[in-house]
Image (tube, grey):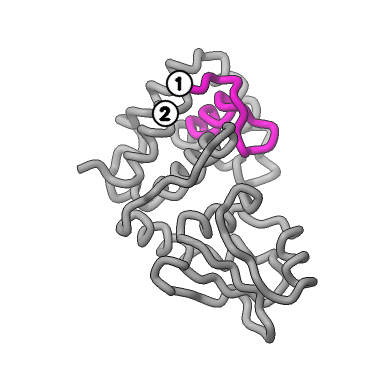
Amino acid sequence: MASFARTERDQLCSLALELGGSAPTLCEGWDVKDLVVHLMVRERTLLGAPGIVVPSLESLTEGISARMARADLPLLVDQLRRPKVTWAALGPVDRLVNTVEFFVHHEDLRRAQPGWRPRELSPSQQSTLWRALATGGRMLLRKAGVPLQVVDSGSGREFAVRRGEEPVVVRGLPSELLLFAYGRGEHADVEISGPGESVRRLREATLGI
């Protein structure tokens, strides 16, 4: 059975071809082809990948991305779909590094289109995303600036991002909470409650990596 990471990869690739390269995404300034190129650079170029997260190396990444973008979308998608010659071909590494990456970017494609609806994920998939959130959520939500509690509306699991009196509570399924933590709050199906000023500060905060 294909892993969650591989399933998300395959579905993202199929949707990218269906939408076409110029369709919008939730990533500001990126269309579908830009997002596919980003994933290719991250996975297939040792020189370009660091510039995704290190500002001083952005120009290097931009140059590699521009050269890669000269290829047609179907070719890029075909290469992305079959990671046979990269570290992503190693199952444990792929699951560790790519499950969240491909889930979030798959939703970046889906939720930028009219009429989108949240998908129904399996309990196992939701648990996988909850573990990812519990591991990285404090870093993703570090700029919240207010006491903050995250609650899984499906199981009741919770953890404190930042302790304090009268915390803001963000409640939803793990998939939606993870998207919220990655800065997709306007497109995440979550319920936010707490003191009005704290809720306002959270909604205006820049979340994610």
Residues 208 and 23: in front is 23
Say what amino acid the circle numbered 1 marks.
Answer: Leu
Q: Residue furthest front?
A: 115
Q: Residue furthest bottom?
A: 165
Instruction: Please report the bounds of the magenta region as a residue range.
Output: 17-41
Tally of numbered tags: 2
- Res. 64 visible in picture: no
| Circle number at residue 17 | 1
Q: Position of residue 103 (x, y in %)?
A: 45, 45
Q: Position of residue 37 (x, y in %)?
A: 53, 27
Q: Position of residue 25 (x, y in %)?
A: 60, 33
Which secondary structure lies at badge 1?
A: helix
Residues 73 and 14: in front is 14
Residue at 38% across, 58% down? 126
Q: Is residue 167 left or right of residue 153?
A: right
Residue at 59% across, 24% down? 23
Q: Quadrant of residue 28?
A: top right
Q: Quadrant of the N terminus?
A: top left
Say what amino acid the circle numbered 2 marks.
Answer: Cys
| In contact (CB < 8 Å): disc 2 and disc 1 | yes
- Res. 149 visible in picture: yes
Mark 2 and mark 1: Cα distance apart in space: 6 Å
Residue at 32% across, 40% down? 6
The answer to if 34 sits in the magenta stretch is yes
For label 1, the crowd category at 10 Å Cα-Cα, with few meaning under 14, some 14 to 19 and many 20 or more, is some
Q: Position of residue 38 (x, y in %)?
A: 55, 33
Q: According to the image, label 2 marks what residue?
A: 13
The answer to if 77 sits in the magenta stretch is no
Residue at 45% across, 50% down? 100
